[in-house]
Image (spheres, rainbow, N blue to C red):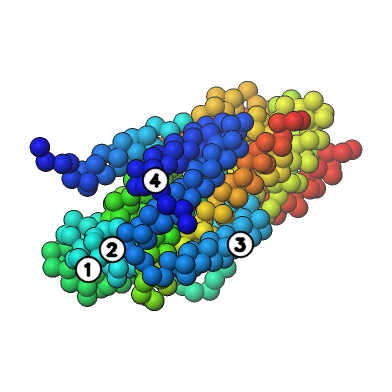
């Protein structure tokens, strides 16, 4: 059995931490990202091997009788979990990435809870105390925090998973927010009870309080996610990402393990930054996202009442316009992902590029259901990443562009964001309305998540093409061949 | 002179790690935010370190069960997270050759 001294283990943990930082750093550019990911795997390998060494060391000190069966248990768990994880990673469709990520957040959360319970039952096994000693108050505080954050992460992520997948009938898993009177008051009471029980546990080592606060944390995780609507999902996923990191860091504090603290904090700050970026891209205050109640998938009747004239066209008309253009910008939205039209789109753009037309893609930060989702979908369809532009980089280009093709996007191209008094005023948008002509593909005139009418659709230069994104794109592609 | 309380040391590590994370993550290109989330999923599964200790060193059935479950859940993330990140990043790479 491996037997590393505590100093060796801690130094190896330092090496693993540096590897994890390298893994994140690699993601600053696609060319360095794969090497970064290898760093991450190596870091994890170093961390697990050192932990085996630490276990060997501690087993000698503790005279653990059941070490062999324990090691077998560890190996079994890794093999079982690893097989499940590897299969999921291989099978998952790219449109389903948000669900996978939410699922994984819940895994971390629940694991944190299990470790906290194990620590409460046998603190000496986790190096918290000498055998037979009571857990010190400081460690009890850290255990309480780690377990509570873990439980909230778990149940919150389960709800987020349900909302993202959208295929479960269960009401809590529906995209539409669940709001009821006194909601925030109830959340506040439950939240304060958790803190109160945590304080009792810290001061008196009352186990009933610990398990009660754990149960309440599971409940509050559900309560805080159900009022948040489908449109705010990118924020929720990022926020739970952050929580899962803090849960790991919290457990790290209670076990006095620097490895967990470093890795947990890296993840925690990463998720926090992503939440911030998402909120900013939607011009929403973080607090109001958390309080929820916004962003149900509504098909409200047009707010203005009377029907304004729109210009509609067929796929052939669209192909004609695209074929005569010199420059085209494509704005993909979530509708594109739902219709799984990214491959058809890639074929269409290849035809346009063959004709010598300049084609670029414009991505709004909240396009898709999680940060960067649309980029991955385009990458899957083998769209070169140098054709794909972020909002800030391409907004100045729209007024020099002949045709903009908007596919299943709505709020992110709504010029109402420039009008003071509009509910989405101030939200950064893709300035599609500045282009020479605009082709918008949607399934119907239904409004977007914000429930707003979109002026863009009524503009003189806009042509609406109604229908399923994939079907329309394929038709445009066919028409472009002649 | 009295020794520094380990919790204080941990707090120092915690704050510095957040600082590093903050600066590194702001440099991540928005195009790779989804892979970033997948890889942070794998990294937060570092919690497996605690789970392994719980699984190998506890002697009660309850402790071992908790440890085993935690190891399994964390392993799902370790393998799933890194592999799905790799799969996504390969997609970004392929097109460079063209």
Q: Chain of mark 1?
A: A
Q: Report the residue marked by disc 1.
A: A132
Q: Earlier in the sequence, mark 4 or mark 1?
A: 4
- Image coordinates of residue B84 in percent, x first then y, are 60, 50
- Does residue A14 lie above or below A47 as drawn? above
Q: Nearer the viewer, mark 2 or mark 3?
A: 2
- Image coordinates of residue A73 in percent, x first then y, are 49, 68
Q: Earlier in the sequence, mark 1 or mark 2?
A: 2
Of residues A426 and A119, which is closer to you in this image?
A119
Q: Report the residue marked by disc 4.
A: A9
Q: Kindly indicate whether the residue at mark 2 contacts the one at mark 1 (C-beta within 8 angstroms).
A: yes
- Image coordinates of residue A184 in percent, x first then y, are 26, 63
The Cα–Cα distance between marks 2 and 3, rounded to whole angstroms, is: 31 Å
Determine the image quadrant of residue A346: top right
Of residues A71 and A471, which is closer to you in this image?
A71
Q: Earlier in the sequence, mark 2 or mark 3?
A: 3
Question: Residue shown at 22%/47% (left/top)?
Answer: B7
């Amino acid at each position: 059995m491996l037997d590393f001294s505590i100093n060796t283990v801690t130094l190896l943990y330092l090496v693993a931490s540096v590897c994890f930082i390298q893994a994140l750093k690699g993601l600053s550019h696609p060319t360095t990202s794969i090497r970064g990911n290898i760093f991450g795997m190596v870091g994890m390998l170093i961390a697990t091997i050192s932990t085996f060494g630490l276990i060997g060391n501690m087993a000698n000190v503790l005279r653990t009788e059941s070490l062999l069966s324990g090691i077998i248990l560890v190996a079994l768990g890794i093999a079982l979990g690893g097989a499940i994880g590897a299969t999921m990673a291989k099978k998952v469709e790219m449109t389903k990435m948000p669900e996978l990520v939410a699922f994984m957040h819940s895994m971390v959360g629940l694991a944190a809870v299990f470790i906290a319970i194990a620590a409460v039952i046998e603190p000496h096994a986790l190096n918290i105390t000498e055998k037979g000693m009571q857990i010190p108050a400081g460690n009890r505080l850290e255990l309480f925090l780690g377990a509570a954050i873990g439980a909230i992460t778990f149940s919150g992520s389960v709800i987020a998973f349900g909302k993202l997948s959208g295929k479960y009938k269960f009401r809590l898993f529906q995209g539409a927010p669940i709001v009821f009177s006194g909601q925030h008051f109830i959340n506040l009471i439950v939240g304060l009870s958790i803190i109160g029980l945590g304080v009792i546990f810290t001061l008196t080592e009352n186990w009933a309080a610990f398990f009660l606060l754990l149960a309440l944390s599971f409940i509050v995780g559900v309560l805080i996610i159900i009022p948040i609507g489908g449109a705010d999902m990118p924020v929720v996923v990022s926020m739970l990402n952050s929580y899962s990191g803090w849960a790991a860091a919290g457990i790290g504090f209670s076990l006095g393990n620097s490895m967990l603290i470093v890795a947990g904090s890296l993840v925690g700050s990463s998720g926090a930054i992503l939440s911030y970026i998402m909120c900013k891209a939607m011009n929403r205050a973080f607090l109001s996202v958390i309080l929820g109640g916004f962003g149900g998938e509504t098909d409200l009747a047009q707010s203005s009442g009377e029907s304004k004239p729109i210009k509609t066209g067929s796929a052939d008309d669209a192909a004609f316009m695209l074929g005569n253009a010199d420059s085209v910008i494509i704005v993909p939205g979530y509708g594109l992902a739902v219709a799984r039209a990214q491959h058809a789109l890639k074929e269409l753009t290849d035809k346009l590029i063959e004709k010598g037309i300049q084609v670029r893609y414009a991505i709004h930060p909240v396009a898709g259901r999680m940060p960067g989702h649309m980029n991955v979908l385009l990458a899957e369809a083998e769209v070169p990443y140098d054709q794909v532009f972020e909002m800030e980089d391409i907004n100045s280009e729209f007024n020099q562009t002949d045709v903009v093709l908007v596919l299943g996007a709505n709020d992110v191209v709504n010029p109402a964001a420039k009008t003071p008094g509009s509910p989405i005023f101030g939200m950064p948008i893709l300035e599609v309305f500045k282009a020479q002509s605009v082709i918008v593909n949607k399934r119907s005139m239904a409004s977007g998540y914000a429930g707003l009418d979109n002026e863009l659709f009524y503009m003189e230069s806009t042509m609406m093409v109604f229908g399923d994104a994939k079907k329309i794109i394929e038709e445009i592609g066919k028409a472009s061949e002649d | 002179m009295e020794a520094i309380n380990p919790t204080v040391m941990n707090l120092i590590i915690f704050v510095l790690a957040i600082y590093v994370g903050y600066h590194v993550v702001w440099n991540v290109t928005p195009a790779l935010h989804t892979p970033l989330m997948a890889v942070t999923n794998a990294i937060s599964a570092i919690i497996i370190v605690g789970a392994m200790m719980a699984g190998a060193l506890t002697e009660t059935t309850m402790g071992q069960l908790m440890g085993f479950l935690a190891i399994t859940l964390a392993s799902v993330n370790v393998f799933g997270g890194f592999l799905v990140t790799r799969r996504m990043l390969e997609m970004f790479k392929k097109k460079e050759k063209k």
